[in-house]
Amino acid sequence: MESMKKTLVSLVIACYRSEHTVRTVVDEIAATFEGNETYDYELLLVNDCSPDDVWSVLRDAADENEHVTAVNLAKNMGRIPALMAGFRLSRGDIVVVLDDDGQCPMDRVFDLLGPVTGETDYDVAVADYPVKKQGFFKGLGSKLNERMTRIVLEKPKDVRFNNFLAMRRYVVDEIMRYENPYPYLTGLLLRTTRRIVNIPMEERDRLCGGTTYTLKKLVALWMNGFTAFSVKPLRIATVFGFFTAIAGFVWGLVIVIRKIVNPAQIMAGYSSLMAVILVVGGVLMLMLGLVGEYVGRIYISINRSPQYVVRDVYYGKLPAIRTEDDA
């Protein structure tokens, strides 16, 4: 009797400052899929130009595990561009995204694969952590990102995004159609499908070290989501400017009427005048900066600035699941 063909799962990990943790994650993935009769896997480890020795660790993993492919980027581009590089090399029917620090509960990966395999109603399955074990900046970024995606991207309230998720092949193919710089995974997912399900599970503690999530990365992530997939911020700025102008007109009319009715009541007010000028000037500069951010990103996109630059792809041993045509 002919054995049933296994479903190929591509696991993509963006690696940065994880030379002491990523190998443990690789070994757990191998142990999780070993002997599984339903799923086969390939593991794409993308070095986001990490300053530590993680590239050597990834190459060693590729030498020792035939399912592993190591990808080396020429410069640091951020987590999402690194994932995009992994997506383009992936071949799986299902693509799984997880972290390199061991916080994603790999033993629950099959709970994510179930809803997006076969004839189900879901295209994306995302881990839902009731309690997030995050640093201050990462926690703040998650909260701001949650509120921003609801307002700007109209994300459903009952859907929550985390770094551990599984996607169908067609979703990944649609995501890869986005070739501009500043990719934003949540926005790409929401513009592709709303068939998203959350799977409750517990987030693990970090294997070692601290978060690499800095204030700069927080601001960059927030700006990507704020400007990349919606013009709603510009519309909000237009509405705010309209009501500010109306308020200014009404206040000016009130001053004129009071001056006509009782001139003695209207005294020269330097402090109030300066306050109004500073407020209006600040609002104008904020709106001008927002417009400038959009224009700048358009300019960079027109110049075809790359999402990432792949320096090396290291296969190690020839993977058993790779055919001669793929080699």
Image (cartoon, grey):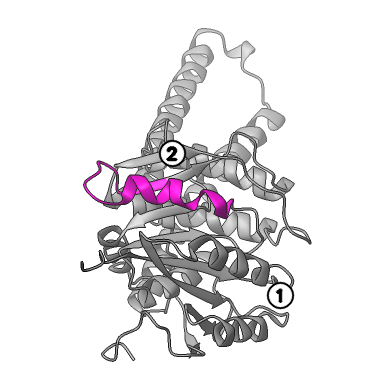
Residue 230 image point, x, y percent: 35, 49
Q: Which residue lies under the disc numbered 1?
A: 19
Image quarter in which the C terminus is found: bottom left
Q: Residue at x 41, y 59 (%)?
A: 294
Q: Which residue lies under the disc numbered 2?
A: 198
Q: State the mark number for residue 142.
A: none
> Is residue 108 within the magenta segment?
yes
Horizontal relation, residue 294 to residue 59: left or right: left
Which quadrant of the structure image shows residue 14? bottom right
Q: Residue at x 37, y 73 (%)?
A: 90
Tag 2: amino acid: Asn
Q: Residue at x 70, y 62 (%)?
A: 212
Q: Secondary structure at mark 2?
A: strand
Q: Residue furthest top?
A: 261
Gap in angstroms between the C-alphas marked 2 and 1: 30 Å
> Is residue 208 within the magenta segment?
no
In this view of the protein, which residue sits in the foreground, 52 or 253?
A: 52
- Give the magenta range: 105-125
Asked whether the viewer can see residue 231, the reply is no
**Label whose residue precedes the other's in the sequence (2 or 1):** 1
Residue 98 image point, x, y percent: 53, 59
Tag 1: amino acid: Glu
Q: Tell me if mark 2 has few (under 14), some (14-19) or many (20+) residues whose alpha carbon lies within 10 angstroms of its own.
A: some
